Structure formats: structure tokens, C-alpha cells
Image: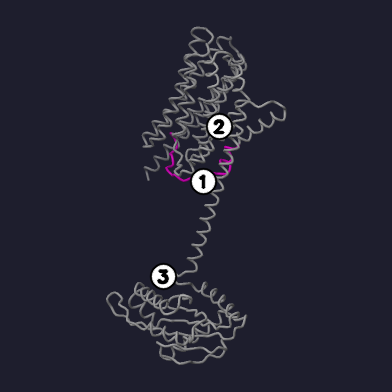
Amino acid sequence: MSGQAGDGRVALRSTRAWRAAAVGAAVMAVVFGVVLIVKPFSESTITAFTDLGQLTAATLGGCGAAWAAVRAWRTDRQRLATSWGLISAGVFAWAWGEAIWTGYEVILGEEVPFPSLADAGFLLLPVIAGFGLLLWPVGVAEGRDRMAALLDGVLIGAGLLVISWATSLGATVGAGGEDTTAAVIGAAYPVGDVILTALVVVLLTRAGPSNRKSLLVLSAGLVLLAVADSAFMYGTSTNSYSSGGLLDVGWFAGFLAVGLSGLAMGASPVSRTRHLTVSRRRLALPYVPAGIAMVIIFAALFAGRPLHLVEVLCALIIVAAVAARQFLVMTDNRELLTALEAGEDEVRRRGLTDPLTGLATSTLFEDRLRQSLRRANRDGQPRSVLVVDVDDFDVINRSLGSAAADQVLVEVAERLQQTVRNADSVARFGDDEFAVLLEAGHRSPDHIAERVVENLRTVLDVGGQPVPITASVGLVVDKTRRLDVDPGELIAGARHAVRQAKAAGKDRYASADETLPYALGFSRSV
């Protein structure tokens, strides 16, 4: 108990520390944004403040992700540790690029050339962090789940690519000019951001319920970075970006969010379950960017603007991915329906089948008897019902135990099935009572009753001890062929005949009169 209390106190302290860090990060982001809006310092000071602030935020973000990696490794969650390690490496790569950018602007006082080594660090973030998201443990085991995740990724990526084309990528490509290297690097920013955002959305739809807070904060941080990168490239291609603008808040807040997500992962255990239930909102998430993309495309067509090849190809990909995704959904629904029907059949079978003997239950027997009586009204052939009661079964149960009693019941069931035809129905009504429905075609139901008595008369070896077995049988034959005959009346008449057979000395049968249930008489007995 003391160990559990200690773990609770540690978890409480970790939660409080994370909340304090979150409040601190929010205050820092607000102060950073206010300074960029108000600009209380000189332009050079604002530039230094912005560059050093972003470098500090990226360093803190990388340290937070590294802390999560170390914490996961210490608790034997190697795959999660690898994911966080890659995310941390990607953030530190960006910080390296920002350090180069800061060197140009703050130390050298020069404008940063494009492209430069800083771009290499910036572009490594979506690549390395993207691999970290791909390795994130989400518990998907089946091939169909992986195919659904792939289609969701294609759907999200194509939708985001159209959105990026309309907001930044199109302008970047259009402003590429004759410098092929610059055009390729410029396009790599929004494309990398699209891929990173797509991976974030897919991860949100596939990850398990554990550490949702950490994953949501991480996703928010990475999306902020992607948006800031795309906006940066758009501003660079249109010569409208300069350090110290409000856009820099996106990087600052994004990296702080990445660091906070790492601290949150350290404070919460990761579930090892591999099965998850996806909510409707998470299922609909991949369709949001695709839907926005299609709205953009239709708006362009409505305005008379010709579509670029990128937009046309993305629209075709979205339509194909949606069709394939819906086909998987229909396949899953069909299999689910099949499994549901099989489960209902199994439940129905268990409810209508005696678990010990495998015979029909009284419910199923009465239904079969009702159907047989309807057929008797058409073919004019009488149906008969036998009720079989094992003699002195209570004595066997009390003296030898329930296991021996079950052995006797199983033997009686097998002998009954061997005595009658396959077309006849044998059921167990409860304890030591059985029933037999004799379909049309029996020349003499009395003869069948005699055979049942004879075949059940045996000595059974139970645990090395001989146990004599006999049974009393009641027979009723319905010759009225009335539509309103109640199966319960026939069964009640056969039970009354059983009692008559037992009163006459057991190990015999008695036959009830056809004018049931009022006039019952004896036929011959064995």
C-alpha cells in the first residue's frame, strides 16, 4: 500500500510540474507575440530577439522530446523511444538550421542567402520527424488495417497538397524562376509540411487511447510548425517575409508544444493494448482535408480558372482513395454482419440445444412438434409423442454423484437416438426426462415404445460399479388431425401416461387415449 501511495504522489507531482510548464510556455508565447506586435525595440534588436527566441524554443522542444525518448527507453518501450528520439533529432536539426540563420542575421548582420545551409536543417525536420511518426506504436496488426491507414494517408496527403497549392506551393513554384535548385528547395518546404501534417492526422486516427494528451499536444505543435514553414516559403517566394514578423510566433509556440508533449509522455504510462475502438470523429478526420480540397477545386472551376496538373491529379487521387476506402468499409461491414449472424446462430443453437447430451431442448421440440402437426393435417398421417423418464434417477444422483448421473443421461440420449429414425426428433426436457417425436411412417408407435423400453434396459459401468438402468415411457398418438391441437396437450398426456407406467411397476410403457387430455387409458405394457 505504501508503494502505491508513493507512485500516486510521484504521478501527482509530475502532473503538477507539467501544468506549470504548460502555463510557463503559454506565457512565453504570449510575451513573444506581444513583443513582435508592439515592437518596442529597434529593428536589429527585434531580429535578434526573434532569432534567439526561436533557437531557444527549438532547443527546449528537442530536449522535451529527448526526455520522452529516455523515459520510454527506461520502461522498455523501445519502439516509442525510437519515435521520440527521431522527433527530437528532427527538432535539433531545425535548431541547427536556426543557429546558422541567427549567425547570418545577428552576428554577421547579413541577409540570409537562399538557399543556404540553414535550409538543410529546416528541411530535415519533416523528414526525420516523419519517420518518427511512422514508427509510432499504434497497435495495427492486420493487413486490412494497414491498407486503411495507407488510404487515409493518401487521402489526407492529396487533400493537403491541394490546400498547400492554393495557399503557398503554387506561388512558390510559380516564383521559382530559372534557378532550379532554389525552385526545388522552395517546393520541398510545403511538400514536406504536407507529408508531416498527413502523418500527424493518420496517427491521430490510428493511435490508441493512452497518452492522448501528449499526442494531441505533439500534433498541435507539428501542425503549427508545418503552417509556419509553408507561410515562410510563401513569403520568401513573394519577397514579403522578414524576421521579426508575427509568423515567427508559429515556430516559437510549435516547438514549445513539442517539448510539452514530451514532458506529458513522461508523466503518463503507455497502454500496451493492440486493439482499439475508433470514434466517429476520428474516422471522419481524413475526409476533412479531402473535402476542403474538393471545395477549392470546384470553386476554381466555378470561377473559370483552369486547373493545374497538380490539382487535377490530386482530385483523381482523392476520388480513387475515397472509393477504395468505402470498399474496405463495405467489406468490413459485410464481415461484421456475417460474424453477427454467426454469433446469433450460435446463441440460438446454444439456447435450443442441451449442452450435456446435444439433444434439442423443450423449446425446439415443441416448435418441431407444432410444425409436424401442421404437416399431419395435410398428409393425414398421425404423429406420436413419447415421454421417457429414467427410473430411480434421484437415487443414482444422490448415491453416485452428479458425474455418474451425467454419464447415465448421456447413455440414455445415445440409446434413444439409436432406437428411432433420423427423421424423428429426440429432446431432453430437463434432469432425467426425455421426449421423442415420431414422424409419419411408423406402422406401430406402440412397437417403438416397446423398443425404447427394451433398449434402455441395461447395466451401465459407472466408475467400476454396475448401475442398472430402466425407464418408464408414456405414449400419445394424435389421430384427430385438428388444426387447434396444442403441442402442450400431447406432451402433458404423454407425461400422464408415464406416471401410469411408473404406478404399474416402472420399466414399461403406457399409452394414452387419443381423446386427450381428458380420457387416458392403458395399452399393453412390457
Q: Residues within 10 Å of mark 1 (few under 14, many from 20)?
A: few
Query: 392 left or right of 310?
Result: left
Q: What secondary structure is the magenta-colored segment mainly?
A: loop
**Who's the residue at 49% across and 65% down the image?**
349
Apparent side of residue 466 relative to residue 165 in the rendered image (left or right):
left
Disc 1 residue type (three-letter): Thr
Closer to viewer: mark 2 or mark 3? 2
Asked whether residue 265 appears in the rendered view, the answer is yes
**Residue 232: horizontal and vertical position, in percent?**
57, 19
> Viewer-proximal residue, 51 or 448?
448
Where, by quadrant of the figure, is residue 68 drawn?
Answer: top left
The CA distance from mark 2 to mark 3 is 58 Å
Residue 443: x and y in percent read: 49, 86
Q: Disc 1 designates what residue?
A: 277
The one nearer the camera, 256 or 311, is 311
- Vertical placement of residue 87 versus 333, above or below: above
Q: Which residue is mark 3?
A: 356
Judged from the image, the secondary structure of the residue bearing numbered disc 3 is loop
**Label 2 sits on residue:** 157
Q: CA distance from mark 2 to mark 1?
A: 24 Å
Q: Nearer the viewer, mark 2 or mark 1?
A: 2
Q: Residue 409: x percent and y percent?
A: 39, 75
Q: Which residues are magenta?
A: 266-287
The three-letter amino acid code for the residue at tag 2 is Gly
> Residue 170: where, in percent of width, then height?
61, 22
Query: Which residue: 48% across, 76% down?
Result: 423
For the residues marked 3 and 1, what is the alpha-carbon distance in whole angstroms? 37 Å
